[in-house]
């Protein structure tokens, strides 16, 4: 298979820059979501294969470190984080 | 539901062209991975264009390195379900993702590259991740 000139970035056309990238979404409520970014629109941020930290799983940094090393334990296949909830979005790694 | 064989055939061929052995059944997986001697790289293949489309060329590049694992095998997530599930039992501490790469030495996982470490990264950067692990784990044991 020939290497796309876009190698290193998403192949998907007409998608947002983070499409297909695993991100950490920080919520104003204190909940944190880690999942594969699908899209962001007026309604919120759509994620796939999502791990959710609500404080009951121990310290957030420890939970994120675990996800980086051992992968994301999926709690929900798809989540829409409402726009009013979103404080920040950054790559997991 | 698996994709049509014709669609994934080039993705399979890309792996075998670089010297990987395809494992299609649980028995084939066990025949390789139950033998704990030496180093084995398991590439969990995927149809995902944005991640696997970079991971396969990355592995092909890494395999040109001076030091490489003793065995290179691949299972195809979403296609060869039984073989993939069986292979993942050999690195069960790691959450399933595809594409991903597990490097085992004497039956132990010594290096793992998750999908989230592949997404959006240039094949050369992924290859460097792999060759660093090859140098560390696949050389002669002191």
Image (cartoon, coloured by chain):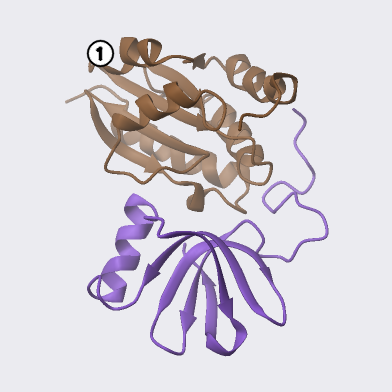
Task: Give the chain letter at badge 1.
Answer: B
The relative height of residue A66 versus residue A46 in the rendered view (above or below) is above
Which residue was labeled with disc 1? B35
User: Which chain is painted in brown?
Assistant: B
Residue A60 visible in the displayed image: yes
Left or right? Give the position of B83 relative to B55. left
Tell me the shade of chain A: purple
Residue A85, given in percent of the width and then of the height, sits at 53, 87
Check the picture and name the quadrant holding the N terminus of chain B.
top right
Left or right? Give the position of A66 relative to B3. left
The relative height of residue B71 versus residue A78 in the rendered view (above or below) is above
The relative height of residue B59 versus residue A35 in the rendered view (above or below) is above
A7, B142: nearer the viewer: A7
Q: Name the image quarter holding residue B6.
A: top right
**What residue do we see at 34% from left, 77% from top?**
A54
Left or right? Give the position of B5 relative to B66. right
């Amino acid at each position: 298979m020939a290497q796309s000139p876009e190698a290193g970035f998403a192949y998907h056309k007409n998608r947002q820059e983070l499409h297909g990238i695993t991100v950490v979404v920080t919520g104003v409520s204190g909940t944190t979501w880690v999942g594969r970014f699908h899209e962001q629109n007026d309604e919120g941020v759509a994620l796939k294969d999502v791990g959710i930290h609500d404080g009951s799983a121990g310290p957030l940094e420890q939970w994120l470190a675990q996800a980086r090393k051992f992968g994301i334990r999926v709690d929900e296949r798809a989540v829409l984080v409402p726009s009013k909830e979103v404080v920040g979005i950054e790559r997991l790694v | 539901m698996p994709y049509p064989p014709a669609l994934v055939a080039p993705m399979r061929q890309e792996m075998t062209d670089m010297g990987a052995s395809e494992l299609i059944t649980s028995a084939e997986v066990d025949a390789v991975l139950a033998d704990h001697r030496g180093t084995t790289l398991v590439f969990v293949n995927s149809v995902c264009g944005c991640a696997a489309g970079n991971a396969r060329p990355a592995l092909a590049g890494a395999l040109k390195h001076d030091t490489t694992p003793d065995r290179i095998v691949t299972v195809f997530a979403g296609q060869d379900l039984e073989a993939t599930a069986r292979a993942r039992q050999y690195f069960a501490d790691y959450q399933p993702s595809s594409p991903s790469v597990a490097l085992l030495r004497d039956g132990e996982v010594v290096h793992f590259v998750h999908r989230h470490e592949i997404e959006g990264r240039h094949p050369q950067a992924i290859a460097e991740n792999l060759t660093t692990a090859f140098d560390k784990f696949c050389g002669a044991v002191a």
